[in-house]
């Protein structure tokens, strides 16, 4: 009999310790990815707490989104006693991650050069604005690199650069930091030594627009902003339809065009020689698309969605982020998980958060730990480092930890 048949499968990074000196989005995303995959991730916060715990507006979701499955310890790095705690904690880690300005961690002796002298197996992940070079001392934000890296130009209309509607570079930069950490862990198995990993916002943004750079290299023609681009497909648009609805519809092959015409009863369009091939239809977009807009406006978005789904054609309703909480696919597949909010007026309330978009062995990487309260795990973590209860009390009395 297999006595382990009902035992839960181990997560791939179980047994690894990650200590993160991070804030905002980029660094915390790296820690969240590693935490979701099973690592013990310890978030080092200032004694007054990570500022993202109390942001308003577009930042209100930062802390609960990117800090699940982590433990929190609050340390005053400006205190000699607190700094000693931080160094001991960092030296207990397999991976240290940070996203402060250049020079900040070195000021405290918490940079890779200092820590690796004491632990040669340490992997150290820097999340920065720019990789080392002429720009490395600039202050970077997601919006900054979107503007200078071509993404805002590609997203907006001509003359109106527009940042993407989420923190794409911060999130992807944190993901690349996690990828680098996992690659370094694999290499450590062979060499016994750790290494420094660098992930940067600007270079991440350039990677995102690399397809448009390559388009220019191949064709000699600059890429037009996405709202003004010449589409590779004739039917590939948002259509305004009956009752004020909107829906994205596409037919990206000749077979899909024929299916579309059959499904909608457009035999005349199907038989029209100037629409025979995809390239023919692209050349005729100036007349074809207005005609489609006129015809499709007689249908509701719901009716078109049903037709396109029934015939296997690409379509998408135009949804707002808050509507995704009720998405039937996300709810059926376990793409959302409950967390308890740690801060603010809603502290203690339950909310649903989005999980990483992958499965391992047929299961999603879920929530094991709610986003932590400030210093929630300070006592236990200090005990694990060898501090006695009396020493912990003394550190708290000195405000070196909280």
Image: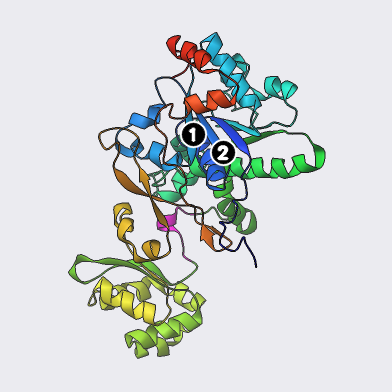
Label 1: which residue?
A: 71
Image x and y of residue 13, in percent: 62, 46
Q: Secondary structure at mark 2?
A: strand
| Within-10-Å neighbours for mark 1: few <14, some 14–19, many 20+ | many
Q: In the image, is residue 287 above or below residue 51?
A: below
From which residue to which does the magenta span run?
Answer: 224-231
Q: Is residue 382 visible?
A: yes
Majority secondary structure of magenta residues: loop
Q: Is residue 127 visible?
A: no
Image quarter of residue 54:
top left
Q: Would residue 254 be found to the left or right of residue 353 on screen? A: right
What distance separates the C-alpha of mark 2 from that of mark 1? 8 Å
Magenta stretch: includes residue 76: no
| Within-10-Å neighbours for mark 2: few <14, some 14–19, many 20+ | many
Mark 1 and mark 2 in contact (Cβ < 8 Å)? Answer: yes
Label 2: which residue?
A: 40
Residue closest to the eye, 372 or 77: 372
């Amino acid at each position: 009999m297999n006595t382990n048949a009902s035992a839960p499968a181990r997560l791939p990074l179980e047994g690894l310790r990650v200590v993160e000196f991070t804030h905002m989005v980029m660094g915390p995303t790296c820690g969240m990815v590693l935490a979701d995959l099973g690592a013990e991730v310890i978030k080092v916060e200032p004694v007054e707490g990570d500022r993202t715990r109390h942001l308003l507006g577009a930042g209100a979701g930062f802390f609960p989104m990117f800090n699940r499955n982590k433990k929190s310890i609050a340390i005053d790095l400006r205190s000699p006693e607190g700094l000693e705690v931080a160094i001991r904690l960092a030296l207990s880690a397999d991976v240290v991650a940070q996203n402060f300005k250049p020079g900040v961690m070195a000021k405290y002796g918490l940079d890779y050069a200092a820590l690796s002298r004491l632990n040669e197996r340490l992997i150290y992940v820097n999340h920065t604005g720019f990789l080392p070079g002429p720009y490395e001392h600039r202050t970077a934000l997601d919006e900054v690199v979107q503007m200078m890296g071509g993404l805002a130009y590609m997203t907006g209309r001509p003359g109106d650069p527009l940042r993407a509607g989420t923190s794409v570079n911060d999130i992807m930069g944190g993901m690349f930091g996690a990828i680098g950490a996992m690659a370094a862990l694999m290499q450590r198995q062979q060499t016994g030594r750790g290494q420094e990993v660098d992930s940067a916002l600007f270079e991440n943004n350039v990677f995102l627009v690399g397809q448009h750079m390559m388009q220019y290299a191949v064709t000699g023609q600059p890429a037009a902003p996405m709202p003004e681009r010449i589409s590779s497909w004739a039917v590939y648009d948002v259509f305004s339809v009956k009752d004020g609805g909107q829906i994205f519809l596409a037919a990206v092959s000749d077979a899909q065009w024929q299916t579309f015409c059959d499904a909608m009863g457009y035999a005349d369009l199907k038989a029209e020689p100037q629409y025979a091939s995809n390239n023919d239809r692209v050349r005729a977009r100036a007349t074809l698309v207005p005609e489609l807009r006129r015809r499709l406006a007689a249908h509701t978005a719901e009716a078109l969605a049903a037709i396109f789904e029934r015939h296997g054609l690409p379509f998408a309703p135009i949804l707002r982020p808050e509507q995704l909480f009720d998405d039937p696919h996300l709810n059926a597949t376990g793409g959302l998980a409950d967390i308890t909010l740690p801060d603010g007026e809603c502290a203690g309330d339950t909310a649903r958060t989005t999980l990483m978009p992958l499965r391992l062995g047929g299961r999603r990487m879920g929530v094991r730990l709610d986003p932590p309260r400030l210093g929630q795990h300070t006592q236990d973590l200090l005990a694990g480092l060898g501090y006695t209860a009396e020493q912990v009390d003394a550190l708290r009395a000195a405000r070196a930890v909280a």
